[in-house]
């Protein structure tokens, strides 16, 4: 289930009674004033109130909800898709960059792989923290996702496949995550963070990466010493998919096949529901194929498509200029006469001509790995733009349904970003790799928290030219880090006592812990529990 499913469920439950009140306390709920009055007054209130301005997104969702739609249609305007279509274009490029830079599996796992898996979480957190009034979304999402992954996902893995966890990596990840959580709690308590603290926050992840690399080196050295240095030469089998007879496609055939996201064999055996969804997604997938170069190291030709890659030299830079920071640079004029987008278009056409004339259809050029870096940049810009829209949309949802940013973050945003991890880790565990699944539960969220908060604070400092600020949203802000810290401490104590064996009883304990936390969080949000 995607985040839109959770959103639809929330709308059904909440739209009947809490549609037109404010969730931040900055909006009046008196008759005729603020967002609770007539439509014309509500629209005027939204237009003249600074907190209602949404400068980061392409669409001002508050004006859409309160000025363009009648009150009874406001719930229908709320649609959400948290996780963009990034895996097919983002992760292969990260894998290609990793192989190009000759990174080891451990370094790649805690850097490029962590970035690939956590890109929606990181960019959503950066977009939210870059403004103090939406920082609650990031707090809720990061801590909510952390609790969800370390309890629901880890508990589900233990239920599906009880196993003995690797002791040292488990303790290492839990200790570093506890440090990050308690450090973030201190930042929230003080409500501000300086430049030095932000850089130290990012440096903590560098220390974590170095710890992983050093630990891996020591482990491999001990393993090699135990085997007396016996070297095993891997046998590389010949590809069974290599064609028996050479076949050369024309340039136009390569371009058309490259822009076709539908696999005919998969189409024939899939159910009609999958086909309907595929038809809806096809225009977006074609646009991604047209604008984002993908270098796949798992393919023999590394996904080299000469006509399409040449076209990428035009479309990729142009797309970045048009959507970066919600299109802020799309209309910039050089000396008031020449638009920037036209300059990028002309440079792209020149580079595309060079690529097309100096390469062949059959063999990728030596500089083909550079397309992976270009694809990485375009994917990052796309995900960042999507994250900005999600944050703006959730901010509008909080105003419409009278919900705080924190509870929206720990439910919709956290579930939308983590539900894929739940299903993928359960699948990995069922295939007999529960250690890999439990390692993914802790390794990725450390990266998400440290880089999401760290880079978001740097963005806020750059825009405000002062220390980053966090606006507290009451008791719920303290329940989140407290619950996450408690779950980590309990795991740190319980798992060693069970001889590092994660059984079904431990899985049930984690699931019950999450249910209790979610109940307390919702009761706090609806003022049943208060100070």
Image (cartoon, rainbow, N blue to C red):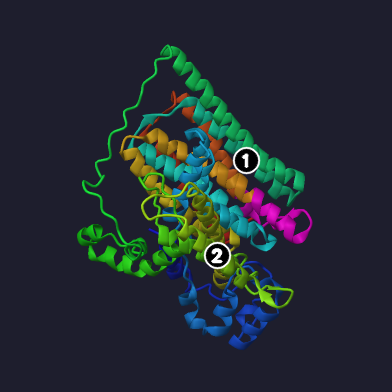
Q: Secondary structure at mark 2?
A: helix
Q: Position of residue 302 (x, y in %)?
A: 40, 48
Task: Name the quarter where the C terminus is drawn.
Answer: bottom right
Q: Residue at x 47, y 29 (%)?
A: 495
The crowd level at tag 1 (other Cα within 10 Å; few <14, some 14-19, many 20+) is many
Q: Main secondary structure of the magenta part?
A: helix
The residue pinned by badge 1 equals: 180
- Residue 34 quadrant: bottom right
Q: Residue at x 52, y 65 (%)?
A: 314
Q: Residue at x 56, y 50 (%)?
A: 142
Q: Position of residue 22 (x, y in %)?
A: 61, 71
Q: Most extreme residue toward the right, as rendered?
A: 466
Nearer to us: label 2 or label 1: 2
Q: Which residues are magenta?
A: 454-479
Task: Name the quarter where the N terminus is drawn.
Answer: bottom left
Name the residue nearer the viewer: 156 or 53: 53
Q: Secondary structure at mark 1?
A: helix
The residue pinned by badge 2 equals: 350
Q: Position of residue 2 (x, y in %)?
A: 41, 59
Report if residue 472 lies within the magenta region: yes
Q: Is residue 38 visible?
A: yes
């Amino acid at each position: 289930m995607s985040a839109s499913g959770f959103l639809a469920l929330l709308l059904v439950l909440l739209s009947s009674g809490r549609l037109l009140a404010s969730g931040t306390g900055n909006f009046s709920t008196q008759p005729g004033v603020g967002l609770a009055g007539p439509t014309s007054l509500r629209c005027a209130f939204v237009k003249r109130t600074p907190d209602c301005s949404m400068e980061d997104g392409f669409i001002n969702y508050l004006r859409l909800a309160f000025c363009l739609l009648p009150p009874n249609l406001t719930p229908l305007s709320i649609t959400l898709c948290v996780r963009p279509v990034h895996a097919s274009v983002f992760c292969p490029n990260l894998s290609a960059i990793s192989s190009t830079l000759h990174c080891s599996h451990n370094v790649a796992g805690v850097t490029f792989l962590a970035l690939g898996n956590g890109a929606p979480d990181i960019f959503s957190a950066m977009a939210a923290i870059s403004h103090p009034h939406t920082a609650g979304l990031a707090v809720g999402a990061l801590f909510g996702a952390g609790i969800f992954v370390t309890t629901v996902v880890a508990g589900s893995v233990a239920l599906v496949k009880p196993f003995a966890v690797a002791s040292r990596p488990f303790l290492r990840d839990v200790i570093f995550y506890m440090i990050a959580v308690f450090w973030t709690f201190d930042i929230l308590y003080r409500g501000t963070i300086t430049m030095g603290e932000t850089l130290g926050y990012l440096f903590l992840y560098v220390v974590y990466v170095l710890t992983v690399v050093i630990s891996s080196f020591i482990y491999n050295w001990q393993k090699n010493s135990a085997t007396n240095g016996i070297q095993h030469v891997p046998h590389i089998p010949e590809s069974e998919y290599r064609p028996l007879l050479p076949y050369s496609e024309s340039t136009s055939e390569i371009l058309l096949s490259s822009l076709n996201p539908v696999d005919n064999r998969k189409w024939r055996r899939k159910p009609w529901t999958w086909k309907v969804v595929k038809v809806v997604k096809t225009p977006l997938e074609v646009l991604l194929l047209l604008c984002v170069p993908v270098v796949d190291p798992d393919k023999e030709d590394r996904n080299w498509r000469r006509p399409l890659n040449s076209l990428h030299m035009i479309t990729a830079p142009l797309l970045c200029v048009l959507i970066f920071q919600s299109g802020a640079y799309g209309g910039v004029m050089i000396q008031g006469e020449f638009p920037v987008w036209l300059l990028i278009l002309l440079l792209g056409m020149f580079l595309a001509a060079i690529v097309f004339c100096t390469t062949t259809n059959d063999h990728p050029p030596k500089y083909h790995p550079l397309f992976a870096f270009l694809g990485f940049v375009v994917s990052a810009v796309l995900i960042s733009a999507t994250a900005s829209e999600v944050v703006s949309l959730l901010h509008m949802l909080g105003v419409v349904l009278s919900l705080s940013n924190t509870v929206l973050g720990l439910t919709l945003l956290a579930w939308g970003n983590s539900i894929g991890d739940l299903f993928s880790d359960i699948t990995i565990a069922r295939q007999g790799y529960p250690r890999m699944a439990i390692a993914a539960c802790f390794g990725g969220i450390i990266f998400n928290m440290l880089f999401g908060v760290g880079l978001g604070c740097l963005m806020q400092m750059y825009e405000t030219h002062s220390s980053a600020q966090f606006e507290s949203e009451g008791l719920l802000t303290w329940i989140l880090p407290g619950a996450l810290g408690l779950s980590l401490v309990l795991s740190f104590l319980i798992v060693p006592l069970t001889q590092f064996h994660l059984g079904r009883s431990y899985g049930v304990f984690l699931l019950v812990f999450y249910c209790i936390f979610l109940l307390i969080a919702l009761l706090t949000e609806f003022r049943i529990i208060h100070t």
